[in-house]
Image: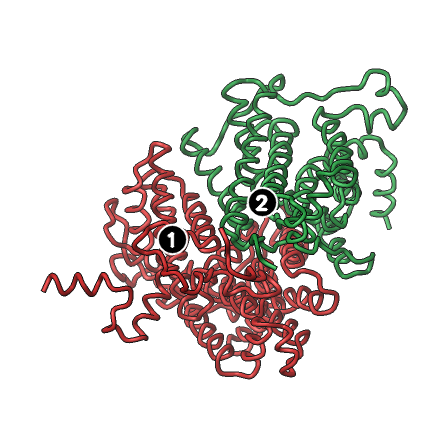
Amino acid sequence: MTALTDILHLLVTANLWQATLAAAVLLLLPALGGVISERSGVVNIAMEGMMLTGAFFGVVADLAWHNPWLATGVAILAGGLMALLHGVVSIRFRADQIVSGIAINIFAAGMTVFLVNRIYGIQDVGHANQNELLPNFNVPGLDQIPFLGQVLFQQNIVVYAALILLVAVHIVLFRTRLGLRIRAVGEHPQAADTAGINVYLIRYGAVVTSGLLSGLAGAFLAIGVSNTFVPNMTDGRGYIALAAMIFGKWTPFGAFVACMIFGLGQAIYDNNSIIHVSPYLLSMLPYILTLVVLAGLVGRSNPPAADGIPYVAGSE
Amino acid sequence: MAQGTGAIVARPRPPGLPPVVRRVVGGLAMPLGSVLFAFVVGGLIVAATGGNPFSAYAGLICGGFGIGCTQGENPALQISNTIVFLTPLIATGIAVALPFRAGLFNIGAEGQLLAGSMACTAIGIKFNTLPTPILLPMVLIGGMVAGALWAGVAGVLKATVGAHEVVTTIMMNYVAQWLLRYLIIGGPLQLASGTSKSQPIGPGARLATLLPSDNSLIVFGLPASVYRVHTGLFIAIAAAAVFAFLLWRTTLGYQIRAVGQSQRAARYAGVSVRRTIIVTMLIAGAFSGLAGAVQIAGVDHNLTDKYFSDTTGFDAIAVALLGLGSAVGIVLASLLFGALHAGGSVMQSDAGISSNLVLVLQALILFSIAANFLGAMRSLIPGLRRPPGAPPPENPAAALMTEAAAPPPEGTPIK
């Protein structure tokens, strides 16, 4: 099996793992958002659309103001606004959350290209200069550690932010009162309401947070990894993040492990020149692995009890 | 006279209207209202970004229905294009609507369609010398089987381990997408290295076009061969009839509806919920797979990279919801979305508005149906507010999706 030995050779290079972590972070941010949203009981399959919206407005702002930090802020806000739309439709109007999520994704795909035409008149948005992108940052000293230094400490600034957010989300969800409230609202909103928790407020907060995180991922994609916006540039990453969330059993670190596995697939795909198996077949792996997990072959994966059920105050 | 009419209008329910008419009017209010809502908001978006919504919509109407064209478009060709677009929407719309009835949300119609088109193409290439009477049924049935298997994975996982069909069908969509890329880029169906399309299917695997592909025959001012409208339209209409018959006139249809109403009640009535879930998904997948096979056999005759960005299976969700899950509704909603797709390109060339506005409109329709904006707006207008004691307005989307997909809100809503 030459393909197997090729992959084994690839697996011992630091370059591959460096790329794996970067690819994983693109999935981790929306996956964390999904974890927060669904833990509060709002199904979120709209990370794809929120990320795409963030990517678009990040590029627009970066091209206008030539400041990647400001542009990232705009991208985060744009993702948050899309999430707010999902929140209003599914919490206030108690819409079916899956239909609303699909609508968000279609809306984002259509609206971004529509706006590209309105703003730039053409399909091509233009490219941001190298010094207007989210920078890479080598941690002084630590980046000299053999192998690990390159993998962990020679990364884009967003990668560090995402790893900090990963720990933060875990602590907030499982070690704080706020986290307890979020989980209570997602498991048994009636009981949470009785205990004096504002179910709607928690859910709005959780959904909007998922949008902010997805927007950040969009900025990383558009003005970090890439330097421009192309239609549908998220290319299903929001859906892979959804898969990672389920794969990780609705926990931050579980999702991270899944993102690393999927990111590894992406990194191998990007380095496909030296391996002899179709990159397209490799790309199926995240989805097939998720199906295997769902089939219960690697332990059950159950969503929060009230996930997807609109809450009506006073109901039993 | 005028006074009398006014009095009748003011009354909540005109006694003169027969119940059938009232039902039809009531049934049409939600879909038409949603479409109206989408077009108004879409028009505002166009206006807010410096465009002219009226010329945009004029372009859509010209491109979709061949009415009021100003740039010399051929009306007959536009209508032909609309029919080509609407044909696969009918069967995929059914593939979403049928599981709705069982309380299942199939958002994998796209993957099932791709599975159908891949199977159709593979069979059509492999046996390309066979004559039409043998090969055409082979490719269509092959497509249906492939689609059924694709959806069956989700059905079996739902019925055995309870895996949510929304998630599993999303995963199967992507598996299909990457399999398609593999097959036609470097895989066994690739035409030649460097291309991203498959070999063409054999002549025996093709559906006839309605008009002969004859360049010397002039129809409505254009050669007959430019009209792509094909006999797959009749297959789609037949599929809608089969769907209606299956749902309302067979035991299986009764079981599907029973499971959708209440799994527990269905179980007490002796219906095997697991079996019904699996069978429902298999049939839904077969409809989607048929749509994919018909698209290859009737229009494209080979797989191309165009299929990478195909969205028929997602449009189908809007079709099923807007059509209220009924066969007639699905055909009408398919007509609307077919016209929007055909109209989008004319809008782009004539009015300079990106054809992606169609996606925006589609999303707005979905929002409006799902959130029942219409009902919310009614309650804001004093004259239309329901009298106290009247049953709370039913969310039409929720009515289609019960238990498994969208548990209806319990109790009476309290502000």
**Res. B129 visible in picture:** no
Mark 1 packing: few (<14 Cα in 10 Å), some, or many (20+)? some
Residue B173 horizontal side relative to residue B7, left or right:
right
Quarter containing the C terminus of chain A: bottom right
The percent coordinates of residue A37 (x first, y second) are: 65, 44
Q: Height in image: B31 above or below B17?
A: above
The percent coordinates of residue B16 (x first, y second) are: 23, 73
- Circles 1 and 2 in contact, beta carbons < 8 Å: no
Amino acid at dot 2: Tyr
Q: Which residue is mark 1?
A: B379
Visual hue assigned to chain A: green
The residue lying toward the viewer, choosing from B179 and B280, is B280
What colour scheme was applied to this rendering of the protein?
by chain
Q: Chain of mark 1?
A: B
Visual hue assigned to chain B: red
The residue lying toward the viewer, choosing from A148 and B309, is A148
The residue lying toward the viewer, choosing from B377 and A144, is B377
Mark 2 packing: few (<14 Cα in 10 Å), some, or many (20+)? many
Q: Height in image: A110 above or below A75?
A: below
Q: Which mark is residue B315?
A: none
The percent coordinates of residue B52 (x first, y second) are: 30, 37
Q: Secondary structure at mark 1?
A: helix
